[in-house]
């Protein structure tokens, strides 16, 4: 090969643009050699609502030899890339004189470390979230500054929790102190955003042709793909085939979900949102992975559910509402069902992390090059407490993050100290964030 392949190479077709994953042809001497290593690290925040069954979440011992508790056992295949963090708190989610509303405050504060103004009106205010601060710094290096995903729609109006706006309970990402970043819950719209190009009419035309002739986005970039193949070695060719296979798999699942959605006469077209939460989480998680893999974004938030939501999980034989079960009152039956929901969520996290671990990027994996925080803003759903939060820090931060540990910090340690440490690793010159008191010692 006479020249290196540009990291920004895109396969183009009518209304279509397919960015490429990391290939050896792009940086033959070392992975991520053309950009500062810290900037190549991805950052993700995955949120779960209504607290956790902490007795089955918290390891009994600290260090690297701890035993995975029941809820975390699905993480065994990626245990070496997961840190369990105990003792972190978001004290600005406490009432602090504002009365009830712990669910709303827990979500609004989770990534901001700021007390939310108690209002059900339009005068919402909390603070910029850590993902959006990071996006300001690394967003210029990718097509999308950040990606916001979820399984339940964002709200901007109405009273969703004891006088707190629905904007608080349904958003963890805040561009400014009074501007939440609405998440996308429709998998099809996320896919079209990732792989669409040109004017909206051109993208619509391309999708219509794909639907009519049962074609893939890859069929629209076939000519560019064939030309590229001649420039690739055997390993890169294999990686491209694996990447294309992942895109085809997502498309196939999208089509299947859309075909199975019940159409109602007089209603809008089915949106193809999967009927089970596991299918929805995995499909959205796969698109987050594709976005990271193709360097379309380096920052993502993903809400598995809105805070305080009360949906049943009939797919795992739980017919009571999630929120109702979280108020268990130490009832063994309710605790057992809450544990089952928490385990169900961790199983989806394990799916996402395992897939990220399987994707090679030079001498590392996509998971190695990521810092992914999983957890929520409430510890025990019955107590509504915001200390000793259930928090996992997954990935290796570009190789600099020791992992596979249970780390116990003096409670309450501000969770914003973790955020300050993460953005410091990404090269951001920030001395304070939210209610932080300093960097979290021992992480790196």
Image (cartoon, helix red, strand yellow):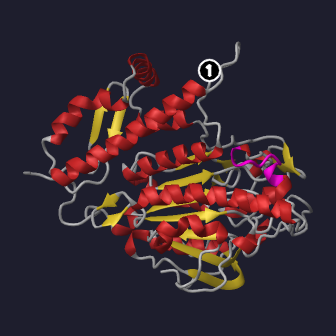
Decide: few, some or many residues near mark 1? Use Cα within 10 Å; few <14, some 14-19, many ≥20: few
Residue that mark 1 sits on: 269
Magenta-colored stretch includes residue 247: no
Task: Please provide percent x and percent y for residue 367.
Answer: 43, 63
Where are the magenta residues, as a range?
Answer: 315-323
Relative vertical location of residue 139 with respect to residue 60 in this rendering, above or below: above
Q: Secondary structure at mark 1?
A: loop
Q: Residue at x 66, y 73 (%)?
A: 415
In this view, the residue in front, 202 or 215, is: 215
Q: Which residue appears at 54% of the width and 47% of the height? A: 282
Location of residue 92 in the rendering, given as x and y in whole percent from the top left corner: 77, 68
Please tell me which residue is depicted at 41% across the width and 32% down the height of the picture. 196
Q: Is residue 136 left or right of residue 368?
A: right
Residue 337 in sight in this render: yes
Name which quarter of the figure residue 228 lies in.
top left
Q: Splitting the image into 4 quarters, where does residue 36 fall?
A: bottom left
């Amino acid at each position: 090969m006479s020249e290196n392949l540009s990291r920004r190479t895109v396969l183009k077709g009518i209304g279509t643009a397919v960015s490429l994953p990391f290939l050896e042809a792009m940086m033959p001497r070392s992975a991520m050699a053309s950009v500062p290593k810290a900037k190549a690290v991805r950052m993700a925040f995955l949120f779960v609502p209504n607290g956790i069954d902490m007795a089955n979440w918290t390891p009994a011992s600290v260090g690297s030899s701890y035993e995975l508790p029941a809820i975390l056992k699905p993480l065994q295949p990626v245990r070496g890339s997961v840190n369990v963090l105990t003792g972190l708190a978001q004290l600005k989610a406490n009432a602090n004189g504002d009365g009830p509303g712990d669910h709303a405050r827990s979500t609004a504060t989770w990534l901001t470390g700021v007390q939310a103004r108690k209002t059900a009106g339009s005068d919402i205010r909390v603070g910029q979230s850590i993902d959006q601060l990071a996006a300001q710094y690394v967003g210029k290096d990718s097509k999308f500054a950040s990606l916001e995903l979820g399984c339940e729609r964002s709200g901007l109006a109405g009273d969703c929790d004891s006088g707190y706006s629905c904007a608080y309970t349904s958003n963890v990402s805040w561009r400014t102190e009074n501007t939440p970043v609405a998440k996308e819950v429709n998998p099809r719209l996320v896919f079209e955003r990732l792989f669409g190009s040109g004017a909206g009419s051109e993208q619509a035309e391309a999708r219509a042709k794909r639907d009519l002739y049962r074609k893939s986005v890859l069929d629209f970039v076939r000519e560019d793909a064939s030309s590229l193949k001649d420039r690739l070695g055997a390993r890169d060719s294999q990686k491209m085939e694996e990447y294309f296979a992942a895109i085809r798999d997502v498309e196939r699942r999208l089509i299947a979900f859309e075909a199975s959605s019940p159409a109602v006469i007089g209603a809008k077209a089915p949106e193809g949102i999967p009927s089970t939460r596991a299918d929805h989480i995995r499909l959205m998680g796969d698109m987050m992975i594709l976005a990271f893999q193709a360097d379309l974004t380096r920052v993502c938030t993903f809400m598995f559910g809105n805070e305080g939501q009360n949906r049943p999980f009939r797919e795992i034989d739980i017919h009571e509402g999630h929120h109702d079960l979280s108020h268990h009152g130490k009832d063994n039956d309710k605790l057992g069902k809450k544990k089952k929901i928490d385990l169900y969520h961790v199983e989806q996290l394990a799916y996402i992390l395992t897939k990220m671990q399987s994707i090679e990027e030079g001498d590392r994996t996509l998971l190695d090059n990521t810092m992914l925080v999983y957890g929520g803003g409430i510890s025990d759903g019955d107590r509504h407490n915001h200390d000793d939060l259930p928090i996992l820090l997954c990935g290796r931060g570009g190789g600099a993050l020791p992992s596979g540990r249970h780390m116990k910090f003096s409670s309450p340690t501000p969770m914003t100290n973790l955020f300050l440490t993460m953005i410091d690793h990404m090269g951001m010159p920030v001395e304070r964030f939210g209610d932080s008191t300093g960097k979290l010692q021992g992480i790196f």
